[in-house]
Image: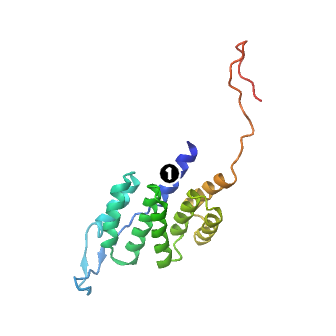
Amino acid sequence: MVKDMRNHLIILLAVITALPALAQRPTDERGETGAAKTVIGQRNPALSDGAQALLAGDIEEGLRLTHLGLKAAFGKREEEAALSNLCAGYIMAEKYDDALVYCEMLITRNDKSWRAYNNRAVIYIKTKQWDKADADLKKGESLNPGAHTMKVARAMYMDAVHPVAPEIEIDDRKSKTNEPPQLL
């Protein structure tokens, strides 16, 4: 149960929300930058709502909205947030091949994205590709050494590769004399 909770925690921590800037220079349908305008509220509601749906555990809706958010992404930051969220969302859906596609796209765009290496490491952990998982964990840890999410992913890896065996076992079978259980 603790392992399942840890797995869910790492996936939820991997999801990042896109917080669009309040003031942007929007482009028209030809892609030309117009006069500066102030945008109050969310620049990309689908991306933000998709992240919130993923965090709430509504994977199908989160992925649908995030795909819409990627199509409407304004700039590198929103595109990278969408790719990261799609990777994390597909991990949550246990569709590791799909998740890997979006992680790879993000790493191709930004090889300094520690979240992409973290997410890809989780994919490799889930698919028992230990050497690849370790390499991605090392890369992500070098990019952001103190990241809590990286520490949780490292713990998942260690639990899978080097499980800790319990040192104490409790014999909880009842004896004929109704004595309390004894430690072995």
Say which quarter of the image contains residue 65: bottom left
Residue 181: give x, y in percent of width and height: 71, 22
Q: Is residue 140 above or below residue 181?
A: below
Disc 1 marks which amino acid?
Answer: His
The residue under label 1 is: 8
Residue found at x 53% / y 65%:
120
Residue 112: give x, y in percent of width and height: 53, 76
Residue found at x 45% / y 55%:
92
Q: Is residue 13 above or below residue 103?
A: above
Residue 95: give x, y in percent of width and height: 46, 59
Q: Secondary structure at mark 1?
A: helix
175 lies left or right of 24: right
Say which quarter of the image contains residue 2: top right
Residue found at x 61% / y 58%:
128
Residue found at x 26% / y 85%:
31
Say which quarter of the image contains residue 177: top right
Judging from the image, the colouring scheme is rainbow
Residue 62: give x, y in percent of width and height: 35, 58
Q: Is residue 16 above or below residue 29?
A: above
Decide which of 142, 129 is in the foreground and name it.
129
